[in-house]
Amino acid sequence: MLTKEQQLLLMLSRLTIKDAEKERIKILADSTDFNWFEFLRYALYHRTGALCWKNMHDMQISSFIPHYIDDILCYIYFGNKKRNEYMEKEKDKILAAFQQKNIPIVPVKGSMLIPSLYKDYGLRYSSDFDLLVRNDDTGGLSEVMTSLGYVLGVFDRATMEIIPAKKKTLLKHKIYLSNEHPYVKRSGTDLFLSFGVDFRFALGYERKCEPVNDMITCFFENGYVPTCYYLLHLCVHFYEEVKQGVDILLGKDLNMIKLCDIREFILRNSVNMEEFIELCFQYDLRKE
């Protein structure tokens, strides 16, 4: 059975809230035995603190929140907002650079959902850019990213230095994974340390390139990607993270913001689930 704190988190970690749910939210928030520090812990873990804070303020129930916790959630919201504004400008530079080289790439996950689904830049945290690229075009990534100041590597927060990826690590990505090794560069702002870019060229454990190629083709031939394709990517990516042993150890396997992404994308885009199921069969991604 869920605790009151877990129930409130679940009901606030969404964009679409029904009137009946709002009444239940007010009752939970006004409970004398409600543990707001426990709620904060869950909100931080699931990365939905800003979304919860905005919903509570929109429903005018913020008076129930201890001022200290309200301030922390407020800082998260406005920190997200400023960070995502910086990231949106950087994303535009990346897209323009690839357009000049005639290499088609398509933003997905937070890079697509924040401006198109959440719209309020403060609501969703995003740690990096997630972009789709054709496998045949991956050879041209390095030239473009290097020209923008990026390095194949990781940002070491202990030393505050960028550590270039070793050849063995790069080879592992090429042979076993569905994405290139992430690119990274300093952000140039005190708000956050670095920009990271993740290029994905395939979906699923069998590294299927066809669905990614088809998404990119749709985008550049029609000006949009059908909603079923975006949903397929969200679901497959979430499944892969849940199944990854490393992600489980790091506590990333059941992150509620990703479930919020999927729920709200379905509700806000009126996804045709029959077409979606057909797509899963077409690419043999039913398990994912």
Image: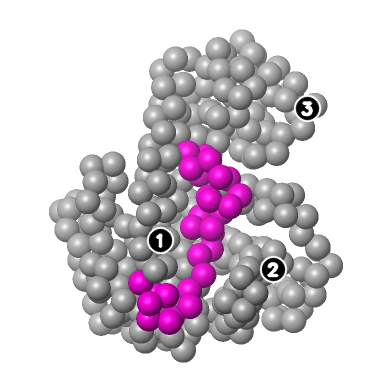
The disc, 3 or 1, on the residue closer to the chain's N-terminal end is 3
Task: Name the residue beneath numbered marker 1.
Answer: 92
Counting from the top left corner in percent of width and height, residue 203 is at 57, 76
Q: Residue 107 colored magenta?
A: yes
Q: Residue at x 48, y 15 (%)?
A: 66
Q: Which residues are magenta?
A: 97-124
Task: Find out whether residue 223 is within the magenta segment.
Answer: no
**Numbered tag placed on residue 19 in the rendering:** 3
Q: Position of residue 238 (x, y in %)?
A: 58, 61
Say if residue 217 shows up in the picture: yes
Please state which of residues 48 and 4 is positioned toward the viewer in this rendering. 48
Q: Nearer the viewer, mark 3 or mark 1?
A: 1
Q: Residue at x 57, y 22 (%)?
A: 57
Looking at the picture, which amino acid does disc 2 mark?
Pro
As drawn, the label of residue 226 is: 2
- The amino acid on which the numbered mark 3 sits, given as a three-letter code, is Asp
Q: Quarter of the image containing the C terminus?
A: bottom right
Q: Residue furthest right?
A: 274
Would you identify the image quadrant in which residue 143 lies? Answer: bottom left
Q: Count the marks.
A: 3
Find the distance from the CA under tag 2 to the CA under tag 3.
Answer: 31 Å
Residue 282: quarter of image: bottom right
Left or right of 23, for residue 215: left
The residue mark sitting in front, 2 or 3, is 2
The colour mode here is one colour
Instruction: Specify which label sits upstream in the sequence, 2 or 3.
Output: 3
Dot 1 crowding, Cα within 10 Å, few <14, some 14–19, many 20+ = few
Where's residue 197, x and y in %?
38, 65
Q: Is residue 72 above or below residue 232?
A: above
* Crowd tier of the residue under label 2, counting other residues whose Cα lies within 10 Å: few below 14, some 14–19, many 20 or above: few
Q: Is residue 17 left or right of residue 188?
A: right
Q: Secondary structure at mark 2?
A: loop
